[in-house]
């Protein structure tokens, strides 16, 4: 029933671990606890809170899109979801990249230099006039 990707409410239900049976039980408890006199008032309040929350999320999205400018309209926000990251996979991929990575200029420049031959007796060391 809620397996479609377009249903935000179903995603929220499954995010909190609530099934249809649990929601029905919560509704029944609300009817019993609040009673038939106060239930319409609280249902109205809940609806207003849901509308305010949706309006806040929509306004935040519009503001973010306007501040980020062009190029971010089609951004895939699911890539930034922290629940998709597996630390073991990230470490494994980083180690594999390290082995496959070709030598770049920084790595070649930062390697240890080969030892220089010692000076002969009476030979003067190299001297650079511009550096001193």
Image (cartoon, grey):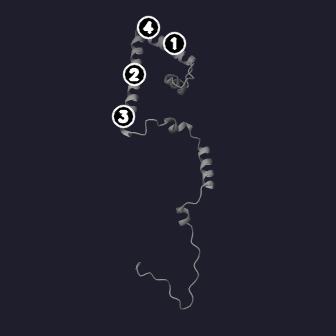
Residue 36 is tagged as 4
Q: Which residue is mark 3?
A: 63
Q: Nearer the viewer, mark 2 or mark 1?
A: 2
- Residue furthest to the top in view is 36
Q: How many marks?
A: 4
The quarter holding residue 59 reads top left
Mark with earlier residue (2, 3):
2
CA distance for labels 2 and 3: 18 Å
- Res. 51 mark: 2
Q: Are marks 2 and 1 in contact (CB under 8 Å)?
A: no
Using a 10 Å C-alpha cutoff, classify the residue at mark 1 as few (fewer than 14 neighbours), some (14 to 19) or many (20 or more): few
Q: Nearer the viewer, residue 46 or 35?
A: 46
Please tell me how crowded label 3 is: few (under 14), some (14-19), or many (20+) other residues with Cα within 10 Å. few
Along the polypeptide, which appears first: circle 4 or circle 1? 1
The x, y position of residue 36, in whole percent, is: 44, 8
The residue labelled by disc 1 is 28
* Dot 4 crowding, Cα within 10 Å, few <14, some 14–19, many 20+: few
């Amino acid at each position: 029933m809620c397996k479609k990707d377009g249903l935000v409410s179903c995603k929220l239900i499954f995010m909190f671990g609530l099934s249809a049976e649990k929601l029905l039980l919560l509704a029944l408890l609300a009817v019993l606890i609040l009673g038939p006199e106060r239930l319409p008032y609280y249902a109205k309040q809940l609806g207003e809170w849901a509308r305010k929350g949706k309006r806040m999320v929509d306004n935040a999205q519009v503001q973010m899109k306007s501040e980020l400018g062009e190029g971010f309209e089609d951004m895939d926000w699911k890539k930034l979801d922290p629940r998709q990251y597996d630390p073991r996979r990230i470490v494994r991929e980083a180690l594999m990249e390290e082995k496959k990575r070709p030598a770049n200029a920084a790595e070649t420049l930062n390697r240890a230099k080969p030892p220089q031959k010692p000076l002969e007796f009476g030979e003067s060391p190299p001297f650079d006039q511009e550096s001193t």
